[in-house]
Amino acid sequence: GSSCCFGLICYLFCGCDSGFGHGLALRLSGLGMQVFAGVLDSEGDGAKKLKEWDPERIAVLQMDVTNPEHIAQVKETINKRLGQKGLWGLVNNAGLLLCPVDAELQSTSSLRRLMEVNFLSAVTVTQTFLPLIRKAKGRVVEVPMPLLSAYSASKAALACFCRVLRLEMLQWGVHVAVIQPSGFKTSMELLIEPIMLILILLLLLLLTLRPLVVILRESTWPSSNHQDMSPVLDCIEHALLSTHPRPLYCPGKSAWLLPFLYTHLPTATFDRFTVRLPEPAPRE
């Protein structure tokens, strides 16, 4: 779609130490836009690179998204900088993976921590800055990713929150978008090799296919994943700048595959396709 045209567009990005948030801050500042980059470590390598890249357009702000004081300080700083102007875009990209183990082995403390960082903190940041977003009739973009039990639970909660928020914000002229990518190389190393589309053509040969979960797990090593984050950045940029943003983006060649299979295949077929199930015991 065509892009919105404004003299100065201001954004707040969370999780800019590395990965998508870092790349997005560099990209949009290069387009002449004012970026408030929230980082966990304001003295880290990622923050230093942002400061050196464009100190006029990138304001690096200490922002632990689980710290209410940090969030309040960032809001105060942005209010002072913007005056009566609203904030056009908020991108909630900060996330935590911890140890990617099976659900049975995931500790309750890890689950609480993941929900706090990946879901509750994103909700808190969104609630805090919605008045500024509403003033500009701007955009809210969330970046949840599927796969892995505890991580998925936290991001699924965020995705559900966004679906409802999108409907609530329509009357205010605020657009809410969800970016749900496949695997890309970020500092979290939640790395998933895109599944070849040929798998769909082989659905009738399920008995000879390797289980999809095995394929996903074997492709989680850094050497086998996407280092080019541009497909994700392109989608976030479209969600922020297009006059007709979409509610859901799925960058990556296979990001749509698991949801598609889950929706369209019978449950038994999907289970057989994705996990190695034991053969049923013969009846006596």
Image: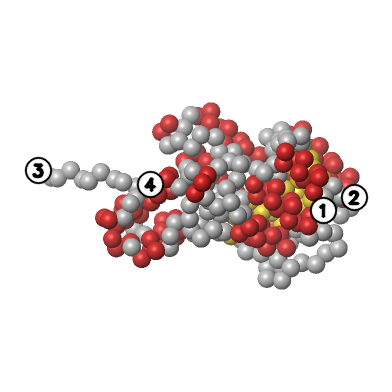
Name the residue located 48 percent from the left edge and 45 percent from the top edge.
220
Residue underneath mark 2: 83
Picture quadrant where residue 67 is located: top right
Residue underneath mark 4: 214
Badge 4 density bin: few <14, some 14–19, many ≥20, Cα 10 Å: few
Which of discs 3 and 1 lies nearer the camera? The answer is 1
Q: Which colour scheme is used?
A: secondary structure
Counting residues from the start of the chain, the first of labels 1 and 4 encountered is 1
Mark 2 lies on a secondary structure that is loop
| Residue at the outermost left position | 284
Pick whichever, 72 or 211, lies toward us: 211
Amino acid, disc 2: Gly
Residue 175 screen position, x and y as percent: 69, 59
Task: Give the alpha-carbon distance from disc 3 to disc 4, as whole Å.
Answer: 32 Å
Q: Can residue 216 be seen in this view?
A: yes
Apparent side of residue 134 relative to residue 185 in the rendered image (left or right): right
Name the residue located 43 percent from the left edge and 63 percent from the top edge.
197
Residue 116 screen position, x and y as percent: 61, 35
Residue underneath mark 3: 284
Amino acid, disc 1: Gln
Name the residue located 65 percent from the left edge and 60 percent from the top edge.
234
Counting residues from the start of the chain, the first of labels 2 and 3 encountered is 2
Counting residues from the start of the chain, the first of labels 2 and 4 encountered is 2
Mark 4 lies on a secondary structure that is helix
Quarter of the figure with the C terminus:
top left
Task: Give the alpha-carbon distance from disc 1 to disc 4, as whole Å.
Answer: 43 Å
Name the residue located 70 percent from the left edge and 66 percent from the top edge.
242
What label does residue 34 carry, if any? Answer: 1
